[in-house]
Amino acid sequence: MLKKVSFMGAGSMAESIIAGILNKDFLTKEQIFVTNRNNQERLDKLQESYQIQVIKDKQEVITDADIVMLSMKPHDMEAAIESIKEHIQPNQLIVSVVAGVSSDDISNLFGKEVPVIRAMPNTSVAIGASATAVSKGKHATEEHINAVIELFNTIGTVTVVNEADMHTVTGISGSGPAYIYYFVEAMEKAAVDAGLDKEVAKDLITQTVVGAGEMLKHSGQTAGELRENITSPGGTTQSGLEALAFNDFQEAVIECVKSARERSIELGDKI
Ligand SMILES: NC(=O)C1=CN([C@@H]2O[C@H](COP(=O)(O)OP(=O)(O)OC[C@H]3O[C@@H](n4cnc5c(N)ncnc54)[C@H](OP(=O)(O)O)[C@@H]3O)[C@@H](O)[C@H]2O)C=CC1
Ligand SMILES: O=C(O)[C@@H]1CCC=N1
């Protein structure tokens, strides 16, 4: 049973996770502590929005926390860990949502064998719809990973992966919502260019994405089968898909995931 969860980092990912777990009543606002580097205005805003415990003093934030959630950018990790490492106790679990940085590197930055679980959620945590992948560092136990699975299960699905696969996971489900939004932006532009009202286009495209997601989840059919069901020979879909293929859509998406994966590796290598 978690009593206190503390966030080192108060940015968009921390806020999305906090919003999600409060919304699901997984923790109370008294149990969530958050700090950042020095942006007091941001802490005040979070306090006002969620009435959580925002505290400048890092030692106070992490003291007695069952979980310390590292939610800063990779390049800020070293300084952030430096500021708390002497106060971390062996029974405290470190959970990192930071892209690229390995659990071994995190333990090394702490200078002790702290248990580390890595989690790669996406911003859909805010509405309880994240696809979160988790992996266990070598000093973490089954009990540790189960606690993290329970936390992220309240705000979406959780999949356990080998840590070596975290870079790929980051390239698909961590960054993935942004690719979908980019695709939606392009669809909206095409619709508006053709004279459709912007709001009408938005509603139709949004429900199309939601419906397609539900079909992927519940129909028992593969993406390829679902696509083929829509594609009448000589029809509109075939024509649209041919235009995508002509413009190297698949290659572009494959390059996109590869590039994100490689960037995750680079971010980790910089530590
Ligand atoms: N955004 C996303 O969709 C996802 C992000 N992630 C990961 O989450 C992490 C955070 O991303 P995001 O929330 O977007 O980033 P933001 O830039 O929004 O937030 C970063 C936060 O880290 C804080 N910070 C910086 N240095 C320190 C420090 N020394 N001690 C304590 N806090 C510090 C910043 O504080 P201050 O404002 O005071 O500088 C800020 O609150 C990244 O590592 C990213 O890889 C993972 C999955 C998805
Ligand atoms: O862009 C990033 O680096 C982070 C990691 C996954 C999503 N956002």
Image (spheres, grey):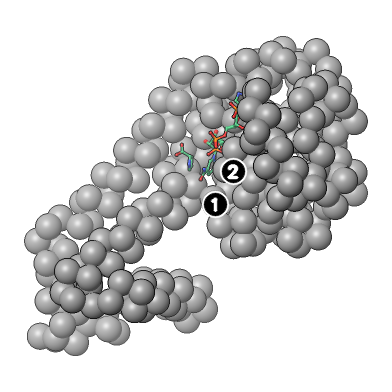
Q: Element at badge 1?
A: helix
The Cα–Cα distance between marks 1 and 2, rounded to whole angstroms, is 6 Å
Rendering coords of residue 97 (x, y %) = 61, 38
- Asked which quadrant contains residue 244, the reply is bottom left
Answer yes or no: do the residues labelled 1 and 2 have beta carbons within 8 Å? Answer: yes
Q: Which mark is residue 233?
A: none
Rendering coords of residue 175 (x, y %) = 44, 47
- Asked which quadrant contains residue 191, the reply is bottom left
At 60% from the left and 16% from the top, the residue drawn is 78
Q: Nearer the viewer, residue 236 or 62?
A: 62
Rendering coords of residue 201 (x, y %) = 31, 75
- Residue holding disc 1: 123
Q: Is disc 1 surrounded by few (<14), some (14 to 19) or many (20+) residues within 10 Å?
A: many
- Residue holding disc 2: 13
Three-letter code for the amino acid on which mark 1 is drawn = Thr
Q: Is disc 2 surrounded by few (<14), some (14 to 19) or many (20+) residues within 10 Å?
A: many
At 49% from the left and 76% from the top, the residue drawn is 214
Res 192 seen here: yes
- Does the closest atom of ligand 1 sit within 8 Å of the Cβ of label 1? yes
At 45% from the left and 26% from the top, the residue drawn is 267
Q: Is residue 66 left or right of residue 151?
A: right
- Sequence-first tag of 1 and 2: 2
Q: Nearer the viewer, residue 202 or 250?
A: 202
Q: Element at badge 2?
A: helix
Q: Is residue 176 left or right of residue 26?
A: left
- Does the closest atom of ligand 1 sit within 8 Å of the Cβ of label 2? yes
Res 152 seen here: no
Three-letter code for the amino acid on which mark 2 is drawn = Met
